[in-house]
Image (tube, coloured by chain):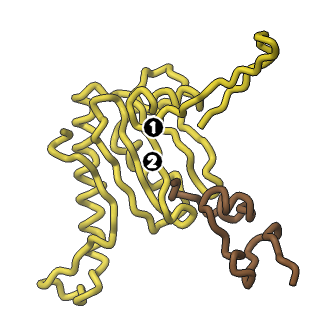
Amino acid sequence: MLLGYKEWIWDESEVESHDDCPYCEEEYPCEYAYMEYSDWNIGELLPELSASLMDLGWEYGIATGYVGWLNQFGNTEVKEVDSVFLKYMVFDTINDSHITAKLDFTHVESGVIKLRRSHHDRPMGETIYIFQCEEDEVLDEDEYYEKLYELGLKERPKSHTIVITSDDTTVGEWEVVE
Amino acid sequence: MREDWSYGELANFTHTKQVEEFNFCLCEEQEDFPYEDCPREEN
């Protein structure tokens, strides 16, 4: 796995007070504790992880998913998958400073990073998939689903065809998708 | 069952959609009617 990490998590509720810090209170970490958390997660770990992605052949990626207030489909252009892009996808595509997020690298070798995050419009979470791609690749909604089906990240809907006949002659077909 | 509804989607729910997705509606008790299309039993 990536540097031994299966996932990268941003959750400020994990920040703990330091016993030897004069500014931290028992239940309330000080601003320096939050800065330390941010420096480590964003300033150090994210760049190291993105460098490892390069080693795995991840040069370009495209992020896509159903997001926001109305759960609408959206996607980025093809981007270089570096720490700036990962940080952008986690934090900068939503106007909220209180988020929790997880980058899941379970399927990284199959060409997918799963970003799960929650924020004020989506307290129960939303999922963005970052697909490894070529520099000139374009991904539409149908291809998005096809990639998820191929990688087993989403179950392909079952469909049945009802054939309507009259005197052994087919007069129509009706496709039902579950 | 899908659990990650957005607030926008929930704001656009109707009684029909509520029952379709969750198989219940708060109007069952005929005390609260959260949606305009909730059925009201006549006394």
Find the distance from the CA under tag 1 to the CA under tag 2: 21 Å
Quarter of the figure with residue A80: top left
Q: Secondary structure at mark 2?
A: helix
Residue B23 picture quarter: bottom right
Q: Which of the chains is yellow? A: A
- Identify which residue is drawn at 71% across, 20% down: A163
Q: Which residue is mark 1?
A: A154
Q: Residues within 10 Å of mark 1 (few under 14, many from 20)?
A: few
Give the residue type that dot 1 points to: Lys
Does the image show residue B8? no
Q: Which mark is residue A89?
A: 2
Tell me which residue sits at (50%, 19%) in the image. A136
Give, as a three-letter code, the residue at label 2: Met
Find the residue positioned furthest to the front: A167
Q: Nearest the camera: A68 or A145?
A: A145
Q: B7 left or right of A40?
A: right
Name above or below for residue A3 compared with residue A120.
above
**Quadrant for the C terminus of chain A in the image:** top right
Residue at horizontal 81 percent and vertical 70 percent from the top: B39
Query: In the displayed structure, does residue A110 sit left or right of residue A146?
Result: left
When the figure is inspected, residue A147 is found, relative to residue B17, above or below; the finding is: above
Q: Position of residue A146 (x, y in %)?
A: 50, 27
**Residue nearer the viewer, A115 or B1:** B1
- Chain seen in brown: B
